Image (cartoon, grey):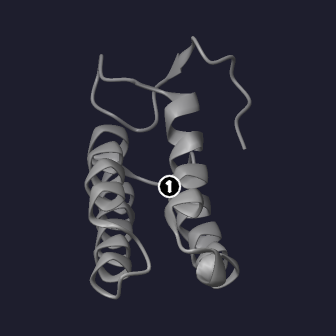
Amino acid sequence: MVNDPPDQTTNYNFTEGETVNTNQKLRTFDLILDAVLPEFRERVAEYLSLYEEALHDTGAGPEDLRASANQLRGYLRGLNTTRVLGMADWEDLDRRIVESWL
């Protein structure tokens, strides 16, 4: 994991000039787990670790990052549909994913 200070930005395979706060990216996964109902957190954490690894892979190309981000959005949509994740939480998390990786 990258441990940049919160005020720094790092370019993760974005087009020239486009950066997102690294802290926001790292915090997104914490917010997802916080939003999940407690009885499902352990199982969701297993899946999230795979998405986190893929989205923080500095060797991944832009298309791979977009594909992983879209898969994560679909996973969260599924959690929302099954009521494991609330609608307000899903909307905020979906927005963060779009801002961070898409």
In percent of width and height, residue 66 lies at 30, 57
Q: Of 45 and 40, which appears nearest the observer?
A: 40
Q: Quadrant of the N terminus?
A: top right
Report helix, strand or loop for mark 1: helix
Residue holding disc 1 = 55
Position in image of residue 36 (x %, y %): 52, 69
Describe residue 100's horizontal placement relative to residue 44 as left or right. Answer: left
Give the residue displayed 70% in from the left and 36% down from the top: 2
Residue 57 shows up from this direction: no
Q: Could you say where residue 67 lies in the image, as x and y percent from the top left?
A: 31, 66
Counting from the top left corner in percent of width and height, residue 52 is at 58, 59
Closer to the camera in the image, 77 or 47 = 77
Position above or below: 101 against 19: below
Q: Does 71 appear above or below 57?
A: below
The residue at 27%/83% (across/down) is 81
Q: Quadrant of residue 91?
A: bottom left
In the displayed structure, would residue 92 be above or below residue 12?
below
**So how many labels did they put on this image?**
1
Residue in the picture at 27% in, 64% down = 87
Q: At 32% across and 76% down in the image, what residue appears?
A: 80
Judge from the rendering whether residue 56 lies leftward or rightward of residue 80; answer left or right. Answer: right
Graded by Cα atoms within 10 Å as few (under 14), some (14 to 19) or many (20 or more), the crowding at tag 1 reads many
Residue 89 in the image: above or below residue 87: above
- Residue 43 visible in the displayed image: yes
Q: Amino acid at mark 1?
A: Leu
